[in-house]
Amino acid sequence: MTDRGSIIYVENLTVSFDGFKALDALSFFMDYGELRLVIGPNGAGKTTLLDVICGKVKPDNGRVIFGRDADISTYREHEIAQLGVGRKFQTPSIYLHHTVRENLELSLDQDKSVWAMLFRQLSSTERDRLDEILAMIGLAEKPHQIAASLSHGEKQWLEIGMVMAQDAQLLLIDEPVAGMTDYETEQTGLLLQAIAKERSVLVIEHDMQFVRQIANKVSVLHEGRLLCEGSVDEVQNNEQVMEIYLGRG
Ligand code: ADP
Ligand code: MG
């Protein structure tokens, strides 16, 4: 949106598992305010890329530059989260026995214990922010519902809301629409587009209909490398991409 350079820039990243290169000298960047889709066959290294950016996996080689910060590839996960990188995993990690609103409250301040968070008074700014997030994730009518009783799609939205409540500037979202109904999938697309008006969003997804719904720019990963980037039409018409997906060769 604004010309502030890249929010995330990974350079020459290599990650090996027992000698197998999940990422192979990968370089990748995205701009502030982008909603970027990363696609690629199973095993391409997509989840590993997110794992490195959020600090869960340490690369053998390469750098991860977040905004104007230094190389964060050696930082610990909670330090990276505090800088403004939020991760949403494939399986929602919400507090099932707490209400929707409590889950969001618990994400407001990652330093506090669950106990301290649930018994402190929220400021009016924080309350307004939670209301805004509840509306965005489509759960404004269900703040007091126990998270365990939400539908699969609603749990996914709640966790996206929790990443927003952390005030992440870069959201990393792994396969959000897997297992969702068509309606939930479409709503998720609208939600991610709304989030990308204020933040940067990196989404991994297989569902090409969903990718087509929301993507401006798509990056294709294959065997730990960036195969190509472009609009949905450009990547779908790319000769090498067609070969991979059609399993030729
Ligand atoms: P994708 O998300 O694109 O399907 P991943 O990043 O999960 O791919 O995995 C890339 C490759 O690295 C796969 O071959 C996978 O088996 C391997 N891999 C990922 N994580 C680990 C791990 N913790 N230990 C060993 N191998 C792993
Ligand atoms: Mg994956």
Image (spheres, helix red, strand yellow):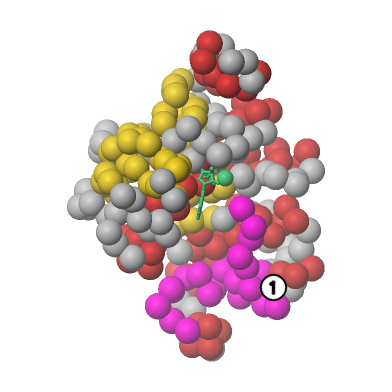
- Locate residue 95: give its quadrant: bottom right
Q: Magenta: predominant secondary structure element?
A: loop
- The location of residue 63, given as percent across then percent down, is 26, 46
Visible in this render: residue 196?
Answer: no
Rendered-image quadrant of the N terminus: top left
Say whether residue 246 is left or right of residue 181: left
Q: Residue at x 31, y 49 (%)?
A: 60
Ligand 2 has an atom within 8 Å of the beta carbon of the residue at disc 1: no
- Locate residue 137: give its quadrant: bottom right
Instruction: Read off the magenta span.
Output: 90-113
Secondary structure beneath disc 1?
Answer: loop
- The location of residue 154, given as percent across then percent down, is 71, 57
Q: Residue at x 27, y 44 (%)?
A: 62
Q: What residue would you read off at disc 1?
A: 96
Q: Residue at x 51, y 15 (%)?
A: 240
| Amino acid type, mark 1 | Leu
